[in-house]
Image: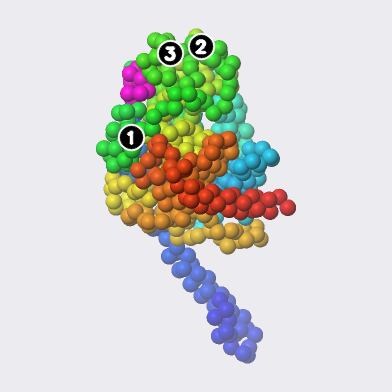
Amino acid sequence: MNHFLHLVPPHGHQVTRAFCTFASAMALWLLSIAQSTVFGEDRPNVLMILADDMGYSDAGCYGSEIRTPNLNSLAEGGIRFSQFYNTARCWPSRGVLLTGFYAQQIRRDAHFGDPRGNGQGQRPKWAPLLPAILRPLGYRSYHSGKWHIDGKPLMNGFDRAYTLDDHDRFFYPQRHTEDDQALPPVDRGSDYYATTHIANHAIRCLEEHADKHRSQPFFQYIAFTSPHFPLHALQSDIDRYREQYTSGWDLIQRKRGERLREMGLVNNEPALMERQLGPPYAFPKNLDRLGPGEIFRPLPWDELTNEQKAFQASKMAIHAAMVDRMDQEIGRIIQQLKRMNVFENTLIMFASDNGASAEIMVRGDGHDPAAAAGSGDTFMCLGPGFSSVANTPFRRHKTWVHEGGISTSMIAHWPKKIHGHGQIRHTPGHLIDIVPTILEAVGSALPATWQSEPVPESPGRSLIPVFNEDVPNLHDHLWWCHDSHRAIRKGNWKLVAAKGDPWELYDLSVDRGESHNLADSNPEKVQELETLWTSQSEEFQRMAAETLR
């Protein structure tokens, strides 16, 4: 507009006023042209789907025997990542996913040895969630499912939201909201099932968008609570897997490992089950509450009693049913996108917030051993045996930062832009990359400032180049810290230490199962990576401390 104002004639107020009006109109017209280039009909929609406690190999396209035809179809029409990572836990992953920063940078997870607790704090002012960044670009945003982030959805940029805050009940939740307003508890006897209800809300938002906001693009974030414990599933889905797992976790793990290698996703044999490693947190009284079928260790299958075998196989059948149902609901959402004629230009990404869980506990309404397994009157968790199967071919589980706890399936599908259908990308990526990827896809970037505060450089990198081909050195390094478990990956070298244990060193190019510790034979590499881990940790602690001033 300033260029036009330089053309204002020097004499005659009415002429000047008229010319200024003309100049302003011309400036607005040119601005609208510029915006139409960015905000035109070719702007992609974005659908981010996040599973909860789903193991690396739980989808069919990642080696599973579980029926996931819709995820498989997305993989066949898009790409799969073989080395994609999360943070090993629910709430840090969600903070990372929607900001593009490590959880420790934004006070959403504790630092190593941090005496202030679990780090579920308030984000700094400079760390908006993605929908707030997208709103000035003309995007409408919708959330459905788990939240687990500070604040509420609508105050963080979402236009509509169904939030399930009750993580202990799939059939009759007591705490849930719509558009940040409390909903009444769900009565027993209702046909409510969380996975279906989350999808129903997502579809209603899409229908409303097509009816009232068709000219605008959308960002939709669907955060399923499946297959997080408690193991609750519809009986009809459980029946499909009733006999599937009676052969035991040792055989199922071996078969998944074979399929993963045949697919070209990994080159390592499944890590041996750590027979003496149980749940990450001890609740010994739960054994009595859950009955003689429950065990806290992944013992060899042939050493289990018949009662234990039946109980464990039943739990895995319910876990599979939960994944199956989630896939069915994803299929319904995809059909809605197709009905809206937006499927071709919608970037769809799918991942899990952490690996499968070895936890065993009883919460919510307790556990009735006489009730049908998987019903709302039961409270069962997968446990370390079949969690090891779900995390095939990696070692350990949710909360640990060994590969089993932090590795996720990751599918990207975008017919208009991704043309390597069915291909695998081996470039390492992380949930910190989701925000930069989406912003590049929509033609934008992180703002330089937010709420008058400078926004630091994000550690995330856009995956857009990786959509076309593998990219060397997308990240100089990737860093983890959760519950005093620590890790860093630089190139193919990974340094990792469980809480209270010394550092272990692995060459992931040949050993993603983390079976051959090279720390003793490579002390220089250990020192190099430890120094890098510590430097990164100190920087993040400084950033977190500054937000408290």
Which kind of residue does numbered mark 3 sit on?
Answer: Gln
Question: Residue drawn at (61%, 54%), measured in percent from left and top?
Answer: 539
Question: Residue drawn at (64%, 53%), measured in percent from left and top?
Answer: 543
Secondary structure of residue under mark 3: helix
Task: Give the quarter of the image for residue 206.
Answer: top left
Residue 90 % position (x, y) = 53, 37
Q: Nearer the viewer, mark 1 or mark 3?
A: 1
According to the image, label 1 marks what residue? 269
- Please say whether residue 448 is visible from this viewpoint: yes
Which kind of residue does numbered mark 1 sit on?
Answer: Glu
Residue 185 % position (x, y) = 59, 25
3D distance between C-alphas at marks 1 and 3: 27 Å
Based on the picture, tell me whether residue 248 belongs to the magenta stretch: yes
Q: Which mark is residue 196?
A: none
Question: Residue drawn at (50%, 69%), measured in percent from left and top?
Answer: 31
Q: Residues within 10 Å of mark 2 (few under 14, many from 20)?
A: some
Which residues are drawn in magenta?
244-252
Q: Which mark is residue 308?
A: 3
Q: Residues within 10 Å of mark 3 (few under 14, many from 20)?
A: some
Q: Residues within 10 Å of mark 1 (few under 14, many from 20)?
A: many
3D distance between C-alphas at marks 3 and 2: 9 Å
Looking at the image, residue 362 sits to the left or right of residue 244; the answer is: right
Farthest residue in the left direction?
262
Residue 293 % position (x, y) = 46, 13
